[in-house]
Amino acid sequence: MGYLLSKENFSKIGEFIYRKSGIYLEEEKHFDKLAKFVDSRAKALGIDNFRKYFFKLRFEDKEGEEFQELMNAITVNETYFFREKDQFEVLVNSILPELHKRLPASKPIRILSSPCSTGEEPYSIILHIVEEGKVVEERDIEVVGIDIDSSVIEKAKIAKYSDRAIHAIPKNILKKWFVKKKIGYQLGDDLNGTVDFQVANVFDKTQMRNLGKFDVIFSRNMLIYFDDASRKEVAMTFYDMLNPGGYVLLGHAEYMSRIVSVFKARKIDKTLIYQK
Ligand SMILES: C[S@@+](CC[C@H](N)C(=O)[O-])C[C@H]1O[C@@H](n2cnc3c(N)ncnc32)[C@H](O)[C@@H]1O
């Protein structure tokens, strides 16, 4: 027996996903995954054809629960601690000292990890900040992590990590801040809960505005799943969310200059950062 989803309908649901999340799915690569998802959701909902499922998803999903199921199924959440580590070093050695000097002492420095997946990126930021120690001794630093996938945010809140997730953390740092469990590692009580994790979609203007203004935005390895129009929209959203002089850091394969020209590119050592 075939799938409920046909090749023709793939483009309809693909277009809906693209419009709502910016994620562009290619039929050749993603058909089977999406078709299996539609079959399993239709079965769970007692629906026997694609048209009814798609109607439910578009028009009867007032609380956004079905859309959330869809997002949780299609996103790619690959991440690990200390990934693209040079950027965390630039953060603590150059960006934070500069912001600390420039911003009024009473103002917390705010850092956004968008997207944060299961929390390895924002907790890598925190680990670098506490290990470096100087700025955090003198002022509050807030770290917020957002992701469209609610299942990764739930995991981030628990902060239990596999051996693979922690493989790049130096042994002395791992020993200091994590507790070894039978399987994997638990982030210790001193740091667990220091990131404010929230489910949010970078294309949802209200959700993004409600997060407030930031001094640094990490947005690594998400824009690669978008097309140029969506990348541009997200880059401008980040621009609006940054305080004057604030910074954006992208993944190693992502370049702001190919997307928008509103940021000034700066190179610190070998790391490219973008300033408002
Ligand atoms: C490959 S992970 C990157 C995680 C981390 N930044 C890193 O570089 O290790 C990409 C994440 O982007 C999230 N994502 C995709 N589209 C999104 C959107 N429209 N809004 C927020 N998060 C999104 C996915 O759920 C996924 O967890």
Image: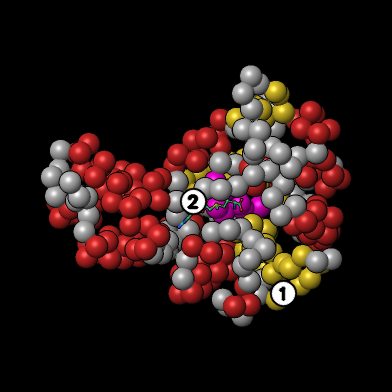
Coordinates of residue 31 in the picture (x, y in percent): 33, 57
Instruction: Name which residue lies at 71% across and 54% down.
Output: 84
Under mark 2, the amino acid is: Val
The residue under label 1 is which amino acid type?
A: Ala
The dot on residue 265 is 1
Image quarter of the C terminus: bottom right
Q: Are marks 2 and 1 in contact (CB under 8 Å)?
A: no
Residue occupying image coordinates x 26% and y 48%: 38
Of 264 and 39, which appears nearest the observer? 39
Residue 62 shows in this picture? no
> Is residue 193 part of the magenta span, yes or no?
no
Q: Residue furthest top?
A: 182
- The vertical placement of 257 against 4, above or below, is below
Q: Which span is picked out in magenta?
A: 110-117
Q: Tag 2's secondary structure?
A: loop
* 38 sits to left or right of 235: left
Residue 112, magenta (yes or no)? yes
Give the secondary structure at mark 1.
strand
Q: Nearer the viewer, mark 2 or mark 1?
A: 2
**Residue 76 badge:** 2
> Along the polypeptide, which appears first: circle 2 or circle 1?
2
- Which residue corresponds to the image point at 45% horizontal and 46% vertical from the top-left? 149
Q: Position of residue 240 (x, y in %)?
A: 56, 67
Label 2: how many Cα within 10 Å (few below 14, some 14–19, many 20+): few
